[in-house]
Amino acid sequence: MVELVAKRYIKALIESSSLEELKGYAENLAVLSEAFYEEKARAFLLSPEVEENKKAEVLLSLLKESDAKFTNFVKLLASKKRISIIPDLYRELVERLHFLENRFEGVVYSETELKREEINEIEQTLSKRVGAQIELKPAPGEFDGIKVEVESLGIEISFSRSRIKSQIIEHILKAI
């Protein structure tokens, strides 16, 4: 439910703003989202006893710069008692910006640490395949092989040693 509401607010923000403005708004929402990870700030922002305009003032005071449109956006959220969805708004805006810029982030899981050159090669190959700029971050883990995941595009590619080994054995047995 919260995601649907966040999508509507972000859709309106995108329709009324330029790409550069949206990047600035994403930075501002990142700062505001961080407030929800601090216990005292979160308690204040989610308290029903605090007036909504006070919450908006506190949030706006956290920002270095804010244009009139973003200030009004935060005040609108406060007046509609939607301050709590700011972290969701941030995630949604970042995702939509990636689509607008045709740039996506993903993760490479492997049991051994991959060299940056290997990750760059995977990025280039995948970027050519999907026609978008892909940035991959390494995430070492207990995966028997390599797994590449770009969640926002719905891409998941994995190569497991055990699976390849079993397929080779199966192929040999069929040949006999």
Image (cartoon, rainbow, N blue to C red):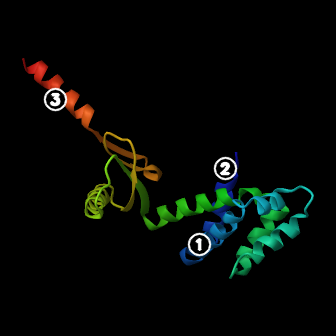
Q: Quadrant of residue 116?
A: bottom left
Counting from the top left corner in percent of width and height, residue 161 is at 25, 37
Measuring 76% from the left and 75% from the top, which residue is drawn there?
60
Q: Residues within 10 Å of mark 3 (few under 14, many from 20)?
A: few
Q: Amino acid at mark 3?
A: Ile
Q: Residues within 10 Å of mark 2 (few under 14, many from 20)?
A: few
Instruction: Label 3: state its secondary structure.
Output: helix
Q: Which numbered dot is residue 168?
A: 3
Counting from the top left corner in percent of width and height, residue 76 is at 79, 66
Query: Could you say which is closer to the camera, residue 7 or residue 145?
Result: 145
Query: Could you say which is closer to the camera, residue 12 or residue 152?
Result: 152
Counting from the top left corner in percent of width and height, residue 149 is at 40, 49
Disc nearer the start of the sequence (1/3): 1
Count of numbered circles in the view: 3
Measuring 26% from the left and 58% from the top, which residue is drawn there?
125
Q: Amino acid at mark 2?
A: Leu
Contact check, label 3 and label 2, Cβ < 8 Å: no
Disc nearer the start of the sequence (1/2): 2
Measuring 70% from the left and 45% from the top, which residue is drawn there?
1
Q: Is residue 3 left or right of residue 148?
A: right
For label 2, the residue is 4
For label 1, the residue is 22
Q: Is residue 94 left or right of residue 157?
A: right
